[in-house]
C-alpha cells in the first residue's frame, strides 16, 4: 500500500518564553492508502494541531512531514494550497459550508478550483450527492438543510475530487448520535467502496469503535497506535 | 463561480448593501447634478459674454491687449471674414470698434465705453437685443443713434429719442465731440453694462474714431460649439499667418471670466470631492466589515485550496458589483435630473428677479444644466475606480488570513 502520510519526529510549539506550549512532541506516524484511522485524545492533546499539520494548514516547528510523498516544509504557501486542493479533502467539525452556495455548488467548489469543466463536475457532484443521500436536495442552501445533511454536503465536498486523504476534525461532534452514526456509516462505506483514506479526530467512544486503526494522543505524544480492537482490549 | 459567489455575498446583508448602493447613488447623483448645473451656468456665462463682446475667438492688433485704444485697429477685408465663416464650426463673425469716452447730457456726464457694432449681426447673436426695455435695438440705417444702459440713462436722465454728446479721442489722437440720439435702452441687471455701455452702428463709430472702411479694433468669431475653439483657433491663425494680427481665445481677452470659472470650478470640485470622500468612506467601511465578518469563511475557502488571488478577485468583484449598481443608480437619477435641468432649466427668477452678475456680466436666474458624456462617465468612473481601489486593503487582509487561527 502507498504511504500517504509520513511524520517523523514532528514537534509544534506555540508562544515563547514562559508561555511556550508544546502542542506536539516528536510525533511519528505513517498512514497508508485506504486506511480508516481515528485519533482520540482529550482536549488540548494536539489532535487539531496534528490534523492541521498533515493538512498543510500549519507548519511544524521541527521534524519531517511528508504528505503524498511531498515534504511540507519545502512547499510555498501557494504549493501547499495546490496540495490541499488536489490531494486532500477536509471535513470540519462545524461543517463550514459557504452559506450563499447551494449544496451542489458547495460540493462542486473544489472541482471548480481544479478547472474541471462545468458539465463534468456537475455530473460528478450529483453522483456523489446521491451517494451521501442528498439526492433531490442539490439546490438547497445550507440554512435549508439539517446539521446532518450539512455534514453530508461537507463529506461530499471532501470526497468529490477523489483526494488521496480525507481529514476530518470531529466530524460527528455537532450532530445527534443517530445522525453521527449515519455519517460514520457513510464515511465507512466510502472508505470500503471507493477506497477513500480517512483520518479523523474524535473523542466519542462510538466513533472510535468504528475505526480500524486508533491513535491515542496525549500531551502531544502518541501513546497508543494500532488496531482499534487491540488498543481497546489493552485498556 | 467566483462571480456568482461574489454576487450572492453582497446580498447576505441586504440592508447594508442597499444603504451603500443608495449612498453611492445619492452622492454620484448630487455630484453629477451640481457639476452639470455649474457647467451650465459657466456655458451660459461664456455664451453671453462672447456674444456681447468679441466672440469665442478674437482677432486684434498684437499690441491691443497691452493698451487697448482705437489707434491699434486692424483692417479686416470681407474676403477674410468669408473664409472664416466658411469653416463649419463657425456660426458668425462680428466686427467691433471699442473706444472709451464721456457721455454727456444736460444732466451730467459719465465715462462710458462706446462699442461700434454691426446691427444685423448683433440682432442675430447678441444677448443685449433681448434686454431692450425701451425703444428698440439698432439697425443698419440708424446712423448717429445709440442704445444705452438703463443705469446710464438714469444718471444722464435720458429717454428714447433724447440727445447726448459723446466726447472721445479718435485714432489720430484728436478730441472729438459727436451728437447722437438714444434709439433704445437696455437693462441686463449688470451695473457695469447698464451703467457704462453704449452701442452704436459700426459706420457711425468709424466716423467718430476716424477709422477707414473695413477698419475695426476687433473681429470676433462666434462658434457653433465652444469645444471647437482649439481647432478653429489653429485654422484662423494659419489664415492670418502673414498678417500682423493676433488671434486670441476668449480666455485671454476676458481673463477675469476665465479666472472666475476656474476658481469656481475648483471650489465646486473641492465640495464634490468632500462629498465623494464621505461616500467612499461608507463604501470602505462596508467592504471592510463584510470581509471581517467572513474571515472564517475565507479561511475555509483557502483551506479548500482557493488561491489568494482568487479570494482577492472575489472581494474585488463584490466591490465592483456594489460600485456598478450604485454608479448606475447615481447616473440614472443624477443624469435624468441634470438632463431635465438642461431641457427645462431651473427657474430661480422668483428668488432672483433680475438674475445675478458674475464679473460684471449678467447671468439669467433661469439656470440650465449642461450634461455631457464626459461628465457622466468621468464622475462615475472616478467613483467606481475609487471603489475598486478601496477594496485593496480588505482584499489584502483576506488573502493573508491565518487559516488555523480562523478555524480554531
Image (spheres, coloured by chain):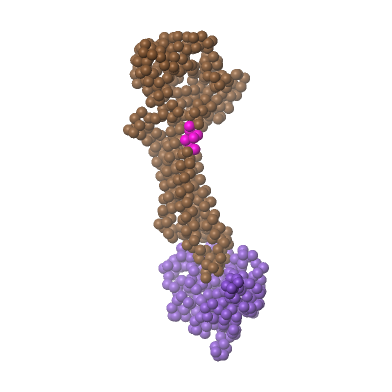
Q: Identify which residue is drawn at 49% across, 12% down.
A: B169
Q: Is residue B275 above or below residue A2?
A: above
Residue A173: give x, y in percent of width and height. Answer: 48, 77
State the predominant SS element of the stretch in magenta.
helix
Q: Residue A75's image quarter?
A: bottom right
**Nearer-the-camera pick, A25 or B213:** A25
Residue B387: give x, y in percent of width and height. Answer: 50, 51
Q: Is residue B262 magenta?
A: yes
Residue B315: give x, y in percent of width and height. Answer: 52, 57
Q: How many marks?
A: 0
**Nearer-the-camera pick, A22 or A40:** A22
Can the viewer see residue B20 in this picture? yes
Magenta segment, which residues? B260-266
From the viewer's perspective, tell me whether residue A201 is left or right of residue A11.
left
Quarter in which the C terminus of chain A is drawn: bottom right
From the viewer's perspective, tell me whether residue A80 is left or right of residue B190.
right
Q: Which chain is purple?
A: A
Q: Which chain is brown?
A: B
Q: Residue B371's image quarter?
A: top left
Q: Is residue A49 above or below residue B389?
A: below
Quarter in which the N terminus of chain A is drawn: bottom right
Q: Identify which residue is drawn at 37% across, 23% down.
A: B187
Can the viewer see residue A87 in this picture? no
Q: Identify which residue is drawn at 42% across, 14% down.
A: B103
Q: Identify which residue is drawn at 60% across, 18% down.
A: B243
Residue B369: give x, y in percent of width and height. Answer: 42, 36
Q: Is residue A189 magenta?
A: no
In the image, farthest residue toward the front: A18
In the image, farthest residue toward the left: B350
Q: Is residue B313 above or below residue A163?
A: above
From the viewer's perspective, tell me whether residue B319 is left or right of residue A30.
left
Amino acid at each position: 500500500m502507498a504511504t500517504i502520510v509520513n511524520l517523523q519526529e514532528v514537534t509544534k510549539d506555540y508562544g515563547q518564553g514562559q508561555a511556550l506550549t508544546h502542542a506536539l512532541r516528536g510525533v511519528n506516524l505513517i498512514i497508508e492508502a485506504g486506511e480508516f484511522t481515528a485519533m482520540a485524545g482529550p482536549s488540548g492533546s494536539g489532535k487539531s494541531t496534528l490534523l492541521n499539520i498533515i493538512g498543510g494548514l500549519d507548519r511544524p516547528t521541527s521534524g519531517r512531514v511528508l504528505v503524498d510523498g511531498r515534504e511540507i516544509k519545502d512547499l510555498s504557501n501557494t504549493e501547499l494550497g495546490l496540495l490541499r486542493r488536489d490531494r486532500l479533502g477536509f471535513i470540519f467539525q462545524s461543517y463550514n459550508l459557504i452559506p450563499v452556495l447551494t449544496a451542489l455548488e458547495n460540493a462542486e467548489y473544489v472541482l471548480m478550483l481544479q478547472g474541471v469543466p462545468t458539465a463534468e463536475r456537475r455530473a460528478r457532484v450529483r453522483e456523489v450527492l446521491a451517494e451521501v443521500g442528498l439526492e433531490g436536495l442539490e439546490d438547497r442552501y445550507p440554512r435549508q438543510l439539517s446539521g446532518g445533511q450539512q455534514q453530508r454536503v461537507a463529506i461530499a465536498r471532501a470526497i468529490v475530487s477523489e483526494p488521496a486523504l480525507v481529514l476530518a476534525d470531529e466530524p460527528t461532534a455537532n450532530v445527534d448520535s443517530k445522525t453521527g452514526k449515519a455519517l460514520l456509516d457513510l464515511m465507512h462505506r466510502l472508505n470500503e467502496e471507493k477506497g477513500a483514506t480517512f483520518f479523523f479526530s474524535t473523542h466519542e467512544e462510538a466513533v472510535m469503535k468504528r475505526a480500524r486503526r486508533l491513535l491515542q494522543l496525549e500531551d502531544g505524544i502518541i501513546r497508543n497506535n494500532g488496531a482499534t480492537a487491540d488498543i481497546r482490549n489493552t485498556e | 463561480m467566483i462571480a456568482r459567489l461574489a454576487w450572492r455575498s453582497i446580498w447576505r446583508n441586504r440592508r447594508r448593501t442597499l444603504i451603500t448602493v443608495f449612498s453611492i447613488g445619492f452622492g454620484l447623483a448630487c455630484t453629477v447634478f451640481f457639476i452639470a448645473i455649474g457647467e451650465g451656468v459657466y456655458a451660459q456665462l461664456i455664451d453671453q459674454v462672447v456674444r456681447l463682446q468679441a466672440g469665442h475667438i478674437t482677432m486684434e492688433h498684437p499690441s491691443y491687449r497691452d493698451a487697448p485704444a482705437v489707434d491699434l485697429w486692424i483692417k479686416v477685408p470681407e474676403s477674410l471674414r468669408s473664409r472664416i465663416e466658411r469653416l463649419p464650426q463657425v456660426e458668425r463673425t462680428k466686427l467691433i470698434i471699442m473706444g472709451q469716452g464721456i457721455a454727456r447730457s444736460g444732466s451730467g456726464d459719465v465715462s462710458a465705453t462706446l462699442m461700434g457694432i454691426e446691427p444685423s449681426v448683433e440682432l442675430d447673436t447678441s444677448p443685449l437685443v433681448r434686454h431692450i426695455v425701451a425703444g428698440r435695438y439698432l439697425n443698419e440705417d440708424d446712423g448717429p443713434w445709440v442704445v444705452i444702459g438703463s443705469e446710464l440713462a438714469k444718471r444722464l436722465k435720458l429717454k428714447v429719442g433724447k440727445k447726448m454728446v459723446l466726447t472721445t479721442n479718435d485714432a489720430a489722437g484728436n478730441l472729438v465731440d459727436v451728437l447722437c440720439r438714444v434709439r433704445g435702452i437696455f437693462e441686463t441687471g449688470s451695473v457695469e453694462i447698464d451703467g457704462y455701455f453704449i452701442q452704436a452702428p459700426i459706420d457711425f463709430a468709424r466716423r467718430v474714431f476716424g477709422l477707414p472702411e473695413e477698419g475695426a479694433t476687433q473681429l470676433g468669431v462666434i462658434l457653433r460649439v465652444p469645444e471647437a475653439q482649439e481647432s478653429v483657433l489653429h485654422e484662423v491663425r494659419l489664415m492670418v499667418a502673414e498678417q500682423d494680427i493676433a488671434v486670441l481665445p476668449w480666455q485671454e481677452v476676458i481673463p477675469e471670466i476665465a479666472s472666475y470659472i476656474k476658481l469656481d470650478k475648483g471650489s465646486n470640485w473641492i465640495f464634490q470631492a468632500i462629498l465623494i470622500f464621505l461616500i467612499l468612506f461608507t463604501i470602505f467601511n462596508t467592504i471592510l466589515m463584510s470581509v471581517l465578518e467572513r474571515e472564517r469563511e475565507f479561511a475555509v475557502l483557502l483551506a479548500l485550496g482557493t488561491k489568494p488571488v482568487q479570494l482577492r478577485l472575489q472581494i474585488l468583484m463584490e466591490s465592483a458589483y456594489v460600485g456598478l449598481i450604485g454608479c448606475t443608480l447615481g447616473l440614472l437619477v443624477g443624469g435624468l435630473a441634470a438632463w431635465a435641468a438642461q431641457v427645462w432649466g431651473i427657474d430661480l427668477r422668483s428668488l432672483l428677479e433680475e438674475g445675478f452678475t458674475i464679473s460684471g456680466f449678467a447671468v439669467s436666474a433661469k439656470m440650465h444644466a449642461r450634461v455631457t458624456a464626459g461628465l457622466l462617465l468621468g464622475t462615475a468612473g472616478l467613483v467606481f475606480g475609487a471603489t475598486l481601489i478601496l477594496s485593496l486593503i480588505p482584499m489584502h487582509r483576506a488573502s493573508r488570513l491565518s487559516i488555523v487561527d480562523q478555524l480554531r
